[in-house]
Image: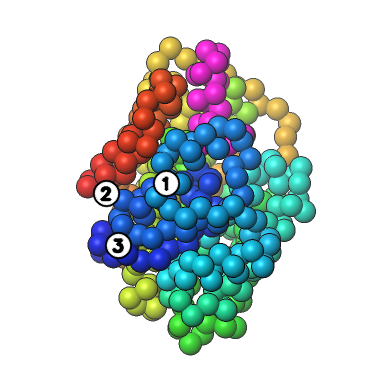
Amino acid sequence: MVLNLDFYRGKNILVTGHTGFKGIWLCKILELLGANVTGYALPSPTEEGKKVFQQSGAEAGMNSIIGDVRDLAALQKAFVEAQPEIVFHLAAQPIVLESYRNPVETYSTNVMGTVNVLECIRQSNSVKSFVNITTDKVYENKEWPWGYRENEPLDGFDPYSNSKSCSELVTHSYQKSFFADGRVAISTARAGNVIGGGDFSPNRIIPDCIRAAYAGGNIAVRNPHSIRPYQHVLEPLYAYLLIAEKQYADGNLAGWYNVGPDECDCLTTGELTELFCQCWGDIKWQDVSVEAPHEAKFLKLDCSKLKAAMGWQPKWHIEEAVAKTVAWAKAWQNNDNISLLMEKQIREFLED
């Protein structure tokens, strides 16, 4: 199966977290596909993020509602206004180290935010398909060398990862308690680490690389030996769109899906940083490993379920993903038209 590019034309779509890194790209894709998009989220917490949202052009093609997913009344109002047929839930506190500093906010956003979205869907007569975006970190990580499958135990270690495990369980409970009749097809998508233009989040390796490159200094890498499944941001977004489309037509396809790269694109943070340096040119990195709160050292996903059920396959290997990210970052630095560049990269991806 491949994504039907005509499916989203004219459909009402609600995206929570539309001001974030993934959310901006998702809204740009949906707008190019002709969807009627409503976004619901708080503003980006960083000035760079606010600028990306503005310069991406996403806001101009959608109904952007600034609101907190923890505010049930405001979220209900947004649902009533949007009358969405499909909902993508991306709003979250997404940073592991931040979750150690602010665990209560992390849990309230990631758990109660999910409860509120599902409650709005329960009260809606328009929603037919819902995809909750979680993370590969939902699994009880045993640091083993093979990929986790969807039937493995959910027990994230740190507050961020664990809150996303809870978000999964909330989704499973609502599905069994209120949607067993199949009136809404519900899936969760557990994606690996993503890279791409527009991510300026703190404590993420590619944003750290870009900031160092802009400043003309060396890249400081705190966990160079940690292995992660890295992929370009368009890879999981395509999968989310595919899941939402296919389960809309066939509720039997609803479920829990891993979304990650092939084995060859699981690499260490040091190897990823070296790729960035080669693409950017005239920059180096250094190991600054220090004692820090626990983060997983080894994490891979088995994505055979999504491949078998929907024929999904990754398109861009890590070398191309890094090259596209560097091209975006240099365009940003040169004050080029970011909206046009994003549209160009989206069209290239969809045509591959």
Residue 303 visible in this rendered orientation of the protein: no
Under circle 1, the secondary element is helix
Residue 88's spot in the image, x, y percent? 48, 61
Residue at horizontal 50 percent and vertical 31 percent from the top: 206
Q: Which residue is mark 1?
A: 60
Amino acid type, residue under disc 3 in the picture:
Arg
Residue 116's spot in the image, x, y percent? 64, 68
**Is 88 covered by the magenta stretch?**
no
Q: Is residue 100 left or right of residue 18?
A: right
Amino acid type, residue under disc 1 in the picture:
Ala
Residue extent of the magenta highlight = 199-219
Residue at horizontal 76 percent and vertical 46 percent from the top: 102
Which label belongs to residue 350?
2
Label 3 or label 2, whichever comes before in sequence order: 3
Tell which of 194 and 197 is nearer to you: 197
Tell which of 226 and 248 is nearer to you: 248
Q: Which residue is mark 3?
A: 9
Residue 13 visible in this rendered orientation of the protein: yes
**Is 209 covered by the magenta stretch?**
yes
Q: CA distance from mark 3 to mark 1?
A: 17 Å
Residue 119 lies, with reference to residue 262, above or below; the image says below
Q: CA distance from mark 3 to mark 2?
A: 15 Å
Label 1 or label 2, whichever comes before in sequence order: 1
